[in-house]
Amino acid sequence: MDMILRAVAIYLILVVVFKIAGRRALLQMTSFDLILLLIISEATQQGLLGNDFSVTGAALCIITLIVMDMLFGKLKKYLPGAEEMIDGTAVVLVENGVLLRGKMKMADISEEDIMASARSNQGLTKLAEIKFAILETNGHISIIPQK
């Protein structure tokens, strides 16, 4: 039972940490981010398994983490407001070619992030060509061009 409680605790800690880190962390991954992710995974492994390095212990942890993820999915589906609390909501960053700097600052998104997404997704090179830029809950920026 100790291992299951460890897995639940680690899962909840990681959910909170990544919620605090924000969607910007999901937007683009640098080599530093990859190194950090590897270090976090090693630290998490030690916290999950403790001194038990058996296959059974590892399987128990994996199953617990997957069940936790499934429970959060069900919670978001059936509890009103849970999805917004856990995943957040989409944020409009540009409206009719105008940067919404307050929202950009809260989301930690720069104009260059928006323009990079506009260039790669829609081939747009000017802010005036963007009707809406929306930071989605998955960390990607959706670009809707002016018509």
Image (spheres, grey):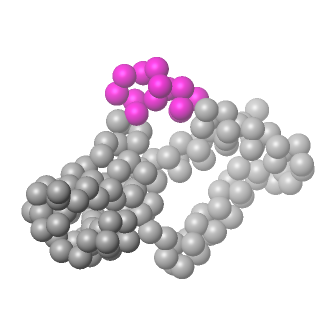
- Residue at image point 60% right, 37% down: 69
Q: Work out which quarter of the rendered image holds the N terminus and state it.
A: top right
Q: Is residue 30 above or below residue 129?
A: below
Q: Is residue 2 above or below residue 141?
A: above
The one nearer the camera, 98 or 40, is 98
Pinpoint residue 97: horizontal percent, then vertical percent: 12, 63
- Residue at image point 53% right, 42% down: 12
Pinpoint residue 91: horizontal percent, then vertical percent: 25, 49
Q: Which residues are magenta?
A: 71-83
The residue furthest front is 147
Q: From this viewpoint, is residue 136 visible?
A: yes
- Residue at image point 50% right, 46% down: 15
Q: Horizontal placement of 98 versus 57: left or right?
A: left
Q: From this viewpoint, is residue 21 visible?
A: no
Q: Horizontal placement of 113 versus 99: left or right?
A: right
Pinpoint residue 107: horizontal percent, then vertical percent: 27, 58
Number of numbered discs on residues: 0
Q: Quadrant of residue 88?
A: top left
Q: Quadrant of residue 113?
A: bottom left
Q: Is residue 26 above or below residue 4?
A: below
Magenta highlight on residue 89: no
The one nearer the camera, 55 or 123, is 123
- Residue at image point 17% right, 57% down: 147
The one nearer the camera, 49 or 110, is 110
Magenta stretch prevailing secondary structure = helix
Q: Horizontal placement of 59 versus 7: left or right?
A: right
Pinpoint residue 74: horizontal percent, then vertical percent: 54, 26
Magenta highlight on residue 75: yes
